[in-house]
Each structure stands twice: as C-alpha cells, then as structure tokens.
Image: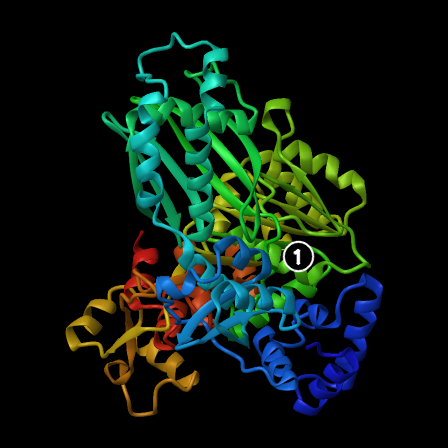
C-alpha cells in the first residue's frame, strides 16, 4: 500500500487543503532539497500533519486512529516487543478476540506486519496514526524511574565506591574507573532517557546528607523524580565529568561543560554545570534539542495588536528589538522565532550567544567563551566586521555591550537582544543605568517586548465561574473594566455580561496527565516606541510614567494578555497569577 505522489497531489487539491500555487512552491522545494513532497508540505506549514495523514488513510482505505488519549493494556502493548515497536514506529493498541489493531506510520511495511502476525498468531488490522500519537504509546512501555532503578540499585550499590563529601583521597585513575562501572553508566543513561521522555528541560542531581535527590524541571516547575543511595554520588559525578570532558580530580571549583546525548526519538546537546556544595558536588544538566522545531510568533502566543506591532518592527531595516523577562521566560525562543522570519537569502544574520540553544541554518552563530576572553562585547565588536545586516546579541549585560549594540543600530543594522527586567517599560531605565544616553535610546529602540511562560491546560479540564470575591481579589492586579472590554472585543463576552458570566478553567488530574498541564505558551506585553514614548525617554521619565502612557495608547499588559488566554481555555487564572506574582 503506497500513495503515489500524483495521486496525493490530486486529492490535496480536491480536498481544498492546498491551492495550485502552494503546491507548485512545495514541488520546487521538494526537488531543490531532494525531500519527499509530503515532508515539505508539513515542514513549510502548508498542510497540517494530521490532515495529511488522514487524507493518506482515506486514499489507502486504511482507518485513521487518534491515539491522543489511548491507554493501552500492558498485555496488548507487549505483544509487539519494544525494540520492534520503536524501530518500525508500530504499536499494538487494541485486541478483540483473534484480531489485533496496530497503529503505524508506514502501511506499506508488510514485512513487519507479517512478523507480528507470526509471533502473535493473530489477525493484524493496520491503522494509520500521527508520529506524536505513536510516540505517546511508545512512552507507555517504559517503567517508572524507581522501578527501573530498583533492582539495579539493590544489586549493585554495594559495588560502587563509597565516598563522602569530606574525602578527597581518590585520585583521577580511581574516579575514571568509577565512571566506567556498568551500574553508574546505566544510572546516568536512564536519568537522561527518562528526562527526554518526560519533556524535562533540566536535570538536577543534588547530594543530600544521607541520599542523592534527582529532580526534573518540567514545564518550568521542578519535580522530585527519585532518590538514590549516597554511595552512587561520586560515580555519577565522575561519569558526568567524563562525558563533559571535565577535570575528574577538581572538587573545590565549579566546572562547566557539555556533551551530546541521543534518545530513541531526539538528539540533545546537554549543557552541564558542576558546583561544589556542602555534601559533595551538585550537577545541573540542561537538555537542548538539536533538531528543535521552529516556532511562529503566533505559535509562541503573540496575538492581535501585539503581533502587528512586532511584525511592523521586524520589517524595519535598522534599530533595536528588545525582549525582556527573567531567566527561563522564553526570551531566546522569541528571538529565534523572529530570526526564523528574517532568515532569507538576501540578508546576513550573525549572533553572539551564551549558550547557542538552537542551531539555525544560514545563520552565523558564535558561542561566548569568557574563559578565553570571548565576551558579548568582544564577540559583538568582531561580529560587526563580518558585514552583518541583522545582529542578535544573546543578552545585554554591561555598559560596553549596550554601547556597541546601540552603535550597531545607529549604523544601519537591525539588532535583536534581551534584557533582564520585569516589564517592558523597565528596559528603558535599565539601559540608562548602563550609561546609554536617553537620546540614543529614543533614536534606536523600535519596540520592547516583555514576557512570561505559563503552562497550558491539558484537554481534560474543569470549568468554573469566578465568584464576586475572586473578582474583587483580581482587581488588585488588573483593571477589571478594561479586561471585560478586551474580552468583548475578542467575542468572549457579550455586551451586558460581566467577568462572572465567563467560563474559566482549572487543571484537572487524569490518567493521561498527572498535573493537568502540558506544554507552555507565552503571555506578553509589547511596547512600541511611539513619538510620545520617545519624548518621555528624552525627559528621563521613570518606568511607571512610560507604562501609564503605553497603556493609554492601547498596550495590553502581561496580566491582561494572560487573562484573555485563561478565558480562551488555554491556561488557568492561577497559572497567570503564579508567573506574574513571582
């Protein structure tokens, strides 16, 4: 069973999923890049992947199955061995008597179907599904961390060298040997594998007095994953140091490194930080997906007037676009989304970053190395000799970098960068604190965007209405009348209705999602530098005056944007207030 390209094109046009111009463009890219047409249609966002697979299923006469909420009984799941399932992207999900329904991506894989038929002695009924659906079922094979480590720890912990935080007698050879012991290798591999499957951004390995605590940061929240015996601590530290090419015999000073790790589905660059603490050495590993999918501005949560203002600023050939917010608020992702739009053959884009979080084709990315004197300011100075049109500076941290970035914007470059401030208006006094003249800020800054990340509610959620007391409490952080006006503009509230008439949603625990949240989205406030704002900058106005003027000109604040997303059922009010009040 195979869908011929000509057949697929006819059905795509007939179904109205694509027009002739878009199809011609996709075919051209397909030939140039030597990629399959359906892969190009999805990567160029011309056709939704699920719609394409549903169409293929219709053409082939094979039923489509949405596996999003499917919980497969263990005895059914294990009819297909995990290595076979992962290697061939095929999973068993339902059995009725002598019939076994299997979901797959390649219905023409008759060899695998025949193998499963012989092994199970069942009639195989193929179904088509999406890669995400298959991935969700594959994740059900895995044991919990505790179950996976249980036998290993009990059997092998005594064989791992014991080492207290005060002992420093082990030499480099002994530590290297500990790092190569099989139990330690398995422990570190399992921690990485489970972190990837749980969509964790960071792994924290923290030595306590009697044990080692492992925590994962998932959707911005740290969660306990498991505890390990104290005996394994030196072996784990040594193993991570070996992987990261760090000094094994250095226990008194912090060390930073990185290594690569490949899970069953993705490749990661792992950034490592080792820090001496009271009970030993603490490790934090940040997982950065090497083949991260690009985000659109709409995809990260920008909408309506804020989106229009950002798009207008992007179209300007010179000036500065600043993104502000605390660490972990998604600033870098926003900058990459902007660069994705700007990345055309006609321009030269160069960056100085710390670290390089995503690799982007056609963009010249430079990693900061402070240990050899390559700072943001030095990197930016060299980068400006490379004839760039667009410059991205990972962060403006000091006076010199700020001055260089401003001068680059004055001399015909579009500069993208970030600042650590709580809101958009706070970026202006922050630049002045860095000794940048107000008239230079007014002349170069085009727009300032402030953001936070909120967790998105899972599909299964609990609806409710706000009480009068809750509305009075919310009035402390936002203008209720303005929020109601915004909700009316969005069509979420009728003319004579109030906030108490709107459906909001709370997180609901379910078998598919323990927290009730999955994934994150941004909430934003976007401050365009208008003539009135420029006058305030020249007058050295404080952040409150600038904020007030921007709001009077129609700026939607972060909390208001968050409440609109809460009313749309994307997130919860509790989540918006959590990130705003932090």
- On the image, the x and y values in percent for residue 343 come to 72, 58
- Residue at label 1? 339
Which quarter of the picture shows residue 214? top left
In this view, which residue lies farthest toward the top? Answer: 169
Q: Secondary structure at mark 1?
A: helix
175 vs 237: above or below: above
Q: Nearer the viewer, residue 341 or 192?
A: 192
Which quarter of the picture shows residue 371? top right
Give the class, few, some or many, for how many residues have Cα within 10 Å of label 1's Cα (few <14, many ≥20).
many
Could you tell me if residue 328 is visible in this image? Answer: no
- On the image, the x and y values in percent for residue 501 come to 25, 85
Which residue lies at the image location 61% right of the left edge and 42% below the top edge? 356
Could you tell me if residue 85 is visible in this image? Answer: yes
92 vs 58: above or below: above
Which residue lies at the image location 50% right of the left edge and 61% below the top edge? 135
- On the image, the x and y values in percent for residue 410 come to 71, 49
Q: Nearer the viewer, residue 235 or 209?
A: 235
Relative to 263, 547 lies left or right: left
- Quarter of the image where the N terminus is located: bottom right
So how many labels did they put on this image?
1
Which residue lies at the image location 51% right of the left edge and 28% below the top edge? 256
- On the image, the x and y values in percent for residue 458 come to 36, 68
Relative to 440, 386 lies left or right: right
Which quarter of the picture shows residue 229? top left
Q: Nearer the viewer, residue 225 or 232?
A: 232
Which residue lies at the image location 34% right of the left edge and 92% below the top edge? 495
In this view, which residue lies farthest toward the left? Answer: 469
110 vs 451: above or below: below
């Amino acid at each position: 069973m195979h869908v011929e390209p000509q057949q697929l094109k006819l059905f795509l046009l007939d179904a109205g999923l694509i027009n002739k111009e878009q199809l011609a463009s996709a075919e051209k890219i397909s030939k140039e890049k030597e990629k399959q047409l359906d892969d190009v249609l999805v990567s160029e966002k011309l056709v939704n992947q699920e719609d394409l697979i549903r169409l293929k299923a219709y053409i082939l006469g094979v039923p489509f199955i949405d596996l999003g909420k499917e919980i497969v009984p263990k005895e059914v799941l294990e009819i297909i061995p995990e290595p076979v399932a992962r290697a061939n992207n095929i999973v068993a999900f339902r059995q009725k008597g002598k019939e076994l329904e299997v979901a797959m991506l390649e219905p023409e894989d008759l060899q695998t179907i025949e193998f499963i038929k012989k092994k199970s002695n069942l009639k195989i009924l193929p179904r088509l599904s999406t890669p995400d659906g298959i991935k969700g079922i594959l994740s059900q094979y895995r044991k919990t961390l505790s179950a996976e480590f249980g036998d290993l720890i009990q059997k092998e912990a005594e064989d791992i060298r014991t080492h207290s935080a005060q002992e420093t007698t082990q030499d480099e050879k002994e530590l290297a040997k500990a790092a190569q012991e099989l139990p330690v290798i398995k422990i570190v591999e399992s921690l990485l594998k489970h972190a990837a499957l749980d969509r964790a951004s960071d792994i924290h390995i923290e030595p306590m007095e009697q044990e080692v605590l492992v925590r994962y940061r998932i959707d911005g929240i740290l969660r306990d994953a498991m505890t390990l015996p104290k005996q394994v601590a030196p072996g784990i530290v040594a193993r991570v140091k070996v992987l990261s090419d760090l000094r094994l015999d250095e226990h008194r000073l912090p060390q930073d490194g990185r290594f690569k790790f490949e899970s069953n589905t993705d490749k990661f660059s792992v950034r490592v930080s080792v820090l001496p603490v009271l009970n030993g050495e603490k490790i934090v590993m940040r997982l950065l997906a090497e083949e991260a999918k690009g985000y659109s501005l709409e995809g990260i949560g920008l909408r309506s007037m804020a989106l229009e203002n950002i798009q207008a600023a992007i179209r300007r050939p010179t000036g500065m676009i600043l993104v502000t917010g605390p660490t972990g608020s998604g600033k870098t992702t926003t900058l990459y989304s902007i660069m994705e739009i700007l990345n055309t053959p006609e321009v030269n884009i160069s960056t100085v970053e710390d670290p390089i979080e995503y690799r982007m084709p056609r963009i010249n990315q430079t990693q900061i190395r402070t240990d050899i004197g390559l700072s943001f300011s030095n990197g930016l100075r060299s980068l400006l000799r490379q004839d760039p049109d667009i410059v991205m500076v990972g962060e403006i941290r000091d006076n010199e970098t700020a001055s260089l970035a401003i001068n680059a914007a004055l001399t015909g470059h579009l500069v993208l960068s970030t600042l650590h401030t709580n809101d958009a208006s706070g970026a202006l006094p922050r630049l002045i604190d860095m000794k940048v003249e107000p008239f230079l800020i007014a002349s170069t800054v085009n727009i300032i965007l402030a953001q936070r990340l909120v967790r998105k509610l899972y599909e299964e959620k609990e609806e409710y209405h706000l009480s009068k007391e809750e509305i009075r409490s919310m009035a402390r952080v936002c203008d209720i009348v303005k929020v109601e006006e915004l909700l009316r503009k969005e069509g979420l509230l009728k003319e004579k209705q109030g906030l108490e008439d709107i459906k909001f949603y709370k997180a609901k625990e379910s078998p598919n999602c323990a927290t009730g949240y999955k994934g994150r989205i941004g909430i934003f406030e976007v401050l365009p530098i208008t003539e009135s704002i420029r006058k305030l900058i020249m007058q050295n106005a404080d952040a409150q005056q600038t904020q007030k003027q921007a709001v009077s000109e129609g700026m939607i604040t972060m909390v208001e944007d968050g409440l609109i997303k809460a009313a749309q059922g994307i997130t919860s009010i509790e989540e918006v207030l959590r990130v705003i009040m932090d």
